[in-house]
Image (cartoon, helix red, strand yellow):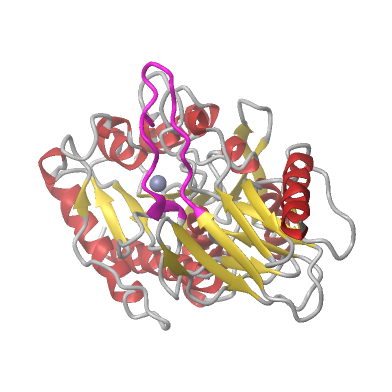
Amino acid sequence: MVRIILEFLSVMVVSCLVHGLSFAEGRLGVEFDFEGASVKVLEINEKEKRISFMPGGDPLRGWPCWWYFRVTGVLPGETITLKLKGSTSTVNKPGAPLSKPLASSWAMPAQATYSVDSAVWRHTDKGTREDEWMIYKVKPEAESFLIAWGPPYTPKIAGKFLSDISRKCPKAEATELCRSMENRAVPMLHVNEAGGMEKKRFGVWVQARQHAWESGSSWVAQGFAEWVASDHPDAMWLRKHAEIFIVPIMDVDNTATGNGGKEAFPHDHNRDWSRQPHWKETVAAQMMIEKLVKEDRMDVFLDLHNPGPGDPTFFFTLPDDQLGQQAKSFRDRFIAFAHSRISRMNPPFLMQDKPKAAGAGYTQRWQEMSANWVSMKGNPHTVGLCLETSWNTTSSTTDGYRGVGANLGASIKDFLHERFLKP
Ligand SMILES: [Zn+2]
């Protein structure tokens, strides 16, 4: 009888949740009515202190592998069990890509990420697999906590971070790339310390999150921006010699609404770099990059991502047969600098020293990928790469990602400084 009542209560709780309601004190609950949140609650078991769930999200708006929500009603000393299953969503629309459910491994980090104060994000202990489930346990010592696939990074976080950094470093201006299709601001940092004083400034463009679920890539962009705005002599040199554009989130709409973004309908942001882009962010970025190309100073373009669950950190490049001699040798030089710094980080990020080619064998729309598009449209000296930073390791934390971003900044300086000395 007790069990029946509990099951009835669970059903009641879940049906309240679809309306985004919160719950009475002392009763385990879930909230997901905030920016970036995503979850489909399957059961809240009050007696076992267990929440069973799947990622939420509209599969037409990208792979349903991102999840992020708040657990409420936790009592002191309680351990909460979070039982995760892969999304069963598919897409029933001509031309849409997800005809069968996505492999659950994309949604199941070895360690989930949680926070009791929305500021410091920690890994949970390693989860355990039980058949189709991944089970995480959290003892938060707080009444409520946020839990997610990885450290969240939303448009509001990006906007606040960029305005804080621009107060600290006045030559770094917090601005907007454009407004999105759903009329959200797309925050951008523009560092132009050299101004019009020096004719030949290097052009550097770093963007993240063309795929909304890859939250780690925005933390890499943040680490890069923090380094650029810092007092480190290398950062000061780079600010003096380069005009720098940083966009921490390209797909703000899917990020804000907790959708995956990857393979969104009709195609995602990183398959959109054609003559007629679908997304407004792509239109705006292309215009600014084409201006840099025209001025012969599209020097370094980096598009930041997170790869597959078992992948190390690596670069994607345009295939060698599509690159000129100078572009190839500059690319290899830049990768050597980045590899020597990132692979020596502590704690380590396992990194491949050779890039992978993103050509026709990788995707049909290889020419519509941003780094490939920039490499093809760019100057003979343009380095255009996509960096995939591994997300499923103990180093894949906010600090780890920010460290990758800082090392990327130092590598850009190493590379451009060498070009500056030997023009
Ligand atoms: Zn991606």
119 is higher (above) or lower (below) than 4: below
* Camera-side residue of 170 and 256: 256
Please give the name of the residue rendered at 48% of the width and 49% of the height, measured from the top-left corner: 208
47 is higher (above) or lower (below) than 194: below
Image quarter where the C terminus lies is bottom left
Furthest toward the top, the residue is 94
Q: Is residue 365 left or right of residue 41?
A: left
Query: Is 66 contained in the magenta span?
Result: no
* Camera-side residue of 275 and 203: 275
Please give the name of the residue rendered at 14% of the width and 43% of the height, measured from the top-left corner: 324
Q: Position of residue 193 (x, y in %)?
A: 58, 56
Q: How many marks?
A: 0
Please give the name of the residue rendered at 72% of the width and 45% of the height, measured from the top-left corner: 11
Q: Is residue 317 left or right of residue 226?
A: left
Q: Is residue 138 left or right of residue 25?
A: left
Please give the name of the residue rendered at 73% of the width and 38% of the height, measured from the top-left corner: 18
Quarter of the rendering containing residue 108: bottom left
Query: Is 96 contained in the magenta span?
Result: yes
Q: Position of residue 96 (x, y in %)?
A: 39, 24
Image quarter where the N terminus lies is bottom right
Span shown in magenta = 85-107
Q: Is residue 108 left or right of residue 151?
A: left
Q: Position of residue 71 (x, y in %)?
A: 73, 60
User: Is residue 409 something one can see in this rendering?
Assistant: no
Report the predominant secondary structure element of the magenta stretch: loop
Furthest toward the front, the residue is 1
User: Is residue 127 something one can see in this rendering?
Assistant: yes
* Camera-side residue of 220 and 309: 309
* Camera-side residue of 152 and 408: 152
